[in-house]
């Protein structure tokens, strides 16, 4: 059997999730200067899943291609993806522009076509804007089946189908569809590996295609939304200690909590 | 919401295991784990039986008859100085248990009274009264000590600094921090982080231990390699002497060459000649970029070679160089259960390197070049580099969780020694051989008391931690190890306590590290400042 599966993994550079974002002085967004960035954790899981599929189906997967749309520094997370097992990658340098999910999905569609990919695995959402749109929009644009919030992915090599267990409210749902398709990842899918030294070194030699937004001039990337204001949630008031269960119940009643 | 659920998902295992640690990146858990250290401690261990009373385990140590027993009059006095909330007395043993036990569950005292004053003046009045009435007192910080120094042996009054916990002053130009002794180390560091500074000391117990406690015990920790010891960074102290007098040297001068440097006397005095109540300390700017790499090597010889290379090539950005042996990682794997070990294959030794600096690109390039070279030369067999904050913290867990993992099987005998680098690991080998010869050791056979003897530590400081993980504390094991370990260290001209101090555990072994003349001078000082020996008795010398 010839190698028929070409996996595309879109990854986003976001403020590291262990870091508490701060709102900028103008109140228009979060402060980005001097803040640590890393790969969106859901995308890290997507990379890991792609690599695991490749390891399990050696004769099926031709290559894993990672793509990131963002500032030039998104190279760092592409290198990480390469070190963790992606074969090639594309950086779409958007400079300082912040693209909305629809624009991202349209660019990704072009990348899918160029790479001739037939399986896209990406995070269900990025932790900066929490949109949870891109995967669904991309599937719509491509007219491909989609399986969102994946907790388990099984590839049927013979029939080129994927069976995906999804996280849904109150349980799981298992669906199956023929490739090509779009899968978005949820937390339980896997635990990403560390990037090992030998692989980090090899990653430096793997090819990185560099494009800019002008290479996608037919895609309208202008924002459709306007950010009116960004503010901190109200601070929680301090808790109190109570001496007895009776007092606790009295307080809860006062607060109309029970 | 998604962020916190993601964090919780990955980190909850660690948070639950780690005693009373506060994780600033885990807001939902922070409240639960930090509000009441006593409760979380007892919750975690409630299924295990109480540790033996120290007085029963060590029958040759007897209560000194010169100390008075607590009377109703004494209580009346304490109530006149302290509010009800500041006094914990024997009506509820549960409440006192936390203050009577050490976290290794090796020692248990019988104190009936815990005082938690909120001001220095109260502490002065308490000590003056106790000194005049010959009531023995144990000063206690976060109670994270490893040599039984912070808990009573008999019925000593516990003087807890927990409620003396305010930041007093910070100068953002000089970086000098002044704070109360009872400020939790992690809180002090979080405060400094907001101003772009860092506490010059870091250790595994940072979520519980106090600034005053680390000074009183001269703790070393993970950043000593970079920022030096507290003897250098502490600029001044406020100390209450046993007679109630207050020594105040809380100035913020980096240079002061007038007279004896008295504060040095209290750094590492373990609460035997005074109670540290305030600390003035010089803090360095917080590095903007941290990198952590976790490596596997084939021998302790290779650990040393990599260390030399790291010093040469990483030089000013090298901030930690820690080593761990295979057995320590095996224990940690058992303890952390589902967490993935950074390296797929097993190696005889592991190294954790941390770099910190002001420019990420510069640090990355340096670390990368260093790792590439050491790997090409075959010194480093495998390794990983953290790609984000979570990975960075997870890599540190494999070093920081070793102490806790060592005691998870029942108990742990801890030896913290300084040795010349070339002999550093030989102590672990010697201890393993001895325990095996005596038929005390087996990783699998539950009838043997010892699970494993593991070694890890700060290569940069020549500091080895030998942890003997046991299923239970027994005299057989203790007799096999002591004074064997101390004799071994002494024969190599090492120190029997590199950073944990003497406390109760090593009181009788100070002679292996200090000369007769030195011990005499220490005793002279003790009897001069504490003539009634009311402070932290039965310990130190």
Image: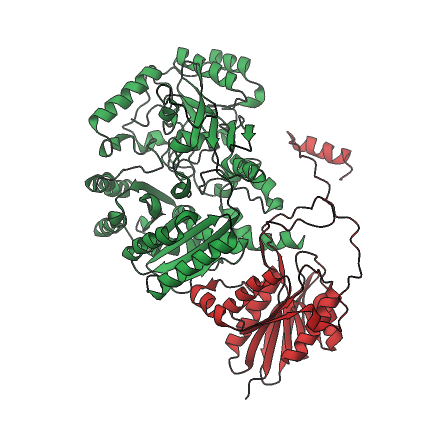
Chain colours: A red, B green
Quadrant of the rendered image containing residue A258: top right
Looking at the figure, which quarter contains the C terminus of chain B? top left
Q: Residue furthest bottom?
A: A1
Residue at 65% in and 31% down:
A242
* Vertical order, A244 against B452 (above or below): above
Residue A16 placement (x, y as % from top left)? 59, 54
* Vertical order, A232 against A102 (above or below): above
A137 vs B99, left or right, is right
B343 vs B167, left or right, is left
Residue B163 placement (x, y as % from top left)? 54, 27
Residue at 42% in and 57% down:
B294
Pick the front one: B111 or B228: B228
* Vertical order, B203 against B342 (above or below): above
Pick the front one: B36 or A112: A112
Residue B117 placement (x, y as % from top left)? 52, 22
Q: Residue furthest front?
A: A214
Pick the front one: B317 or A255: B317
B6 vs B407, left or right, is right
Residue B260 placement (x, y as % from top left)? 35, 20
């Amino acid at each position: 059997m010839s190698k028929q599966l070409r996996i595309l993994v879109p990854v986003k550079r976001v403020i590291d999730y262990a870091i508490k974002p701060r709102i900028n002085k103008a109140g228009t967004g979060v402060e980005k200067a001097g803040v640590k960035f890393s790969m969106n954790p859901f995308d890290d899981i997507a990379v890991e899943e792609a690599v695991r599929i490749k390891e399990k189906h050696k004769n099926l997967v031709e290559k894993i291609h990672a793509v990131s749309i963002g500032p030039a520094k998104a190279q760092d997370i592409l290198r990480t993806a390469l070190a963790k097992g992606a074969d090639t990658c594309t950086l779409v340098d958007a400079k300082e522009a912040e693209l909305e999910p629809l624009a991202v999905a349209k660019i990704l569609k072009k990348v899918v076509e160029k790479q001739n990919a037939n399986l896209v695995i990406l995070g269900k959402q990025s932790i900066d804007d929490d949109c949870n749109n891109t995967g669904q929009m991309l599937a719509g644009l491509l007219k491909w089946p989609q399986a969102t919030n994946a907790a388990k992915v099984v590839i049927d090599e013979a029939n080129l189908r994927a069976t995906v267990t999804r996280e849904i409210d109150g349980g799981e749902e298992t669906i199956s569809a023929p490739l090509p398709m779009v899968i978005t990842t949820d937390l339980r899918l896997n635990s990403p590996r560390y990037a090992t030294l030998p692989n980090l070194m090899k990653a430096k030699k793997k090819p990185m295609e560099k494009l800019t937004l002008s290479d996608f001039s037919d895609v309208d990337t202008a924002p459709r939304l306007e950010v009116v204001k960004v503010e901190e949630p109200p601070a929680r008031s301090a808790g109190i200690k109570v001496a007895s269960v009776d007092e606790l119940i009295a307080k809860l009643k006062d607060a109309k909590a029970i | 919401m998604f962020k916190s659920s993601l964090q919780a998902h990955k980190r909850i295992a660690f948070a639950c295991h780690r005693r009373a640690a506060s994780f600033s990146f885990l807001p939902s858990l922070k409240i639960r784990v930090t509000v009441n250290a006593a409760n979380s401690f007892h919750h975690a261990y409630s299924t295990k039986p109480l540790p033996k009373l120290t007085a029963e385990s060590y029958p040759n140590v007897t209560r000194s008859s010169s100390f008075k027993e607590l009377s109703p009059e004494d209580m009346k006095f304490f109530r006149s100085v302290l509010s009800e909330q500041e006094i914990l007395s024997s009506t509820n043993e549960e409440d006192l248990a936390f203050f009577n036990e050490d976290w290794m569950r090796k020692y248990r005292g019988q104190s009936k009274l815990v005082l938690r004053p909120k001001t220095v003046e109260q502490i002065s009045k308490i000590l003056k009264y106790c000194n005049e009435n010959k009531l023995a007192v144990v000063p206690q910080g976060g109670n994270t000590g490893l040599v039984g120094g912070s808990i009573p042996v008999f019925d000593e009054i516990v003087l807890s600094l927990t409620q003396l916990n305010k930041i007093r002053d910070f100068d953002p130009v000089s970086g000098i921090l002044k704070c109360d002794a009872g400020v939790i180390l992690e809180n002090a560091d979080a405060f400094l982080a907001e101003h772009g500074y860092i506490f010059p000391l870091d250790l595994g117990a940072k979520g519980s231990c106090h600034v005053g406690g680390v000074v009183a015990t001269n703790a070393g920790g993970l950043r000593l390699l970079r920022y030096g010891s507290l003897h250098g960074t502490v600029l001044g102290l406020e100390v209450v002497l046993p007679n109630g007098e207050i020594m105040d040297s809380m100035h913020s001068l980096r240079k002061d060459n007038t007279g004896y440097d008295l504060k040095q006397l209290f750094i590492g005095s373990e609460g035997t000649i005074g109670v540290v109540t305030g600390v003035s300390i010089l803090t360095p700017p917080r590095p903007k970029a941290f990198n952590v790499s976790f490596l596997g090597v084939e021998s302790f010889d290779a650990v040393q070679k990599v260390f030399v290379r790291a010093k040469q090539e990483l030089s000013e950005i090298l901030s930690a160089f820690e080593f761990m042996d295979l057995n320590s990682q095996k224990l940690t794997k058992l303890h952390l259960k589902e967490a993935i070990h950074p390296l797929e294959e097993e190696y005889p030794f592991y190294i954790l390197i941390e770099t910190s600096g002001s420019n990420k690109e510069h640090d990355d390039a340096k670390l990368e070049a260093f790792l590439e070279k050491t790997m090409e030369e075959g010194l480093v067999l495998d390794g990983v580099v953290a790609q984000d904050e979570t990975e960075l913290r997870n890599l540190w867990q494999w070093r920081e969780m070793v102490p806790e993992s060592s005691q998870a099987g029942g108990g742990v005998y801890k030896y913290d020694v300084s040795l010349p680098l070339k002999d550093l690991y030989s102590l672990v080998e010697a201890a393993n051989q001895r325990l095996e010869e005596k038929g005390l050791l087996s990783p699998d056979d539950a009838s043997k008391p010892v699970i494993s003897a593991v070694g890890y530590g700060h290569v940069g400081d020549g500091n080895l931690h030998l942890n003997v993980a046991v299923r239970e504390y027994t005299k057989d094991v203790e007799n096999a190890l002591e004074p064997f370990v101390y004799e071994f260290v002494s024969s190599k001209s090492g120190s029997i306590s590199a950073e944990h101090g003497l406390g109760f555990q090593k009181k009788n072994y100070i002679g292996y590290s200090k000369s007769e003349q030195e011990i005499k001078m220490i005793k002279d000082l003790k009897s001069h400042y504490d003539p009634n020996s009311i402070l932290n008795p039965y310990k130190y010398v």
